[in-house]
Amino acid sequence: MTYPVLALTVGAVTAAGYVWYVPAVIDLRAGLDRPTSHRRRAAATLTGWSTGGLVAVLLLTVDSWRAAAAAAVLGLAATTVIAVYAGAAGGRERHESAEQRAALRLPETPRTTRPFHG
């Protein structure tokens, strides 16, 4: 497969991923209205999808695949680090919420695995 075909494929997949990165942009723009874990998860999502766009551009503009591969590896590493921090922030938020509920003697919020049927 030639580089332009691979670049167009990666670009098409990245463009089709708007269902993930548009809500992530909205979460980031909401700022402090969203919890820290949501904003970090949105940042990880945007990092991952923008890596795909960067790889597509590099495949179109650079003659060697090594630059695109290096960008993909670095983007994957950055996305993973941000996602791990998002998970840690989510754990802290759940722990803090449980402590606040215990202090107020509120019942634990029920978690159901059944889908909502309105």
Image (cartoon, rainbow, N blue to C red):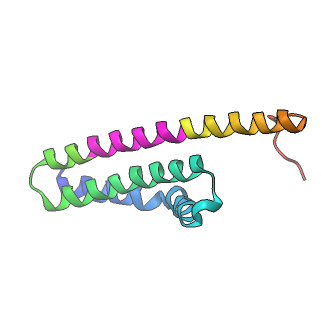
Q: Position of residue 112 (x, y in %)?
A: 83, 35
Q: Residue at x 60, y 60 (%)?
A: 32
Q: Above or below — where is 2 with respect to 84?
A: below
Quadrant housing residue 109: top right
Number of marks drawn: 0
> Is residue 33 among the parts visible in the rendering?
yes
> Is residue 110 among the parts visible in the rendering?
no
Question: 18 or 104: which is nearer to us?
Answer: 104
Q: Position of residue 49 (x, y in %)?
A: 40, 54
Decide if residue 21 is on the left or right side of residue 68: right
Q: Residue furthest left?
A: 63
Q: Which residues are magenta?
A: 72-87
Decide if residue 45 is on the left or right side of residue 3: right
Q: Residue at x 81, y 42 (%)?
A: 115
Q: Above or below — where is 101 with respect to 68?
A: above
The stretch drawn in magenta includes residue 59: no
Quadrant housing residue 107: top right
Question: 66 or 95: which is nearer to us?
Answer: 95
Quadrant housing residue 95: top right
Q: Above or below — where is 4 with respect to 94?
A: below
The stretch drawn in magenta includes residue 79: yes
Question: 43 or 49: which is nearer to us?
Answer: 43
Q: Residue at x 33, y 52 (%)?
A: 51
Q: Position of residue 101 (x, y in %)?
A: 83, 37
Q: Position of residue 8 (x, y in %)?
A: 29, 59
Q: Residue at x 27, y 40 (%)?
A: 73
Question: 19 or 12: which is nearer to us?
Answer: 19
Chief SS of the magenta region: helix
Q: Residue furthest front?
A: 103
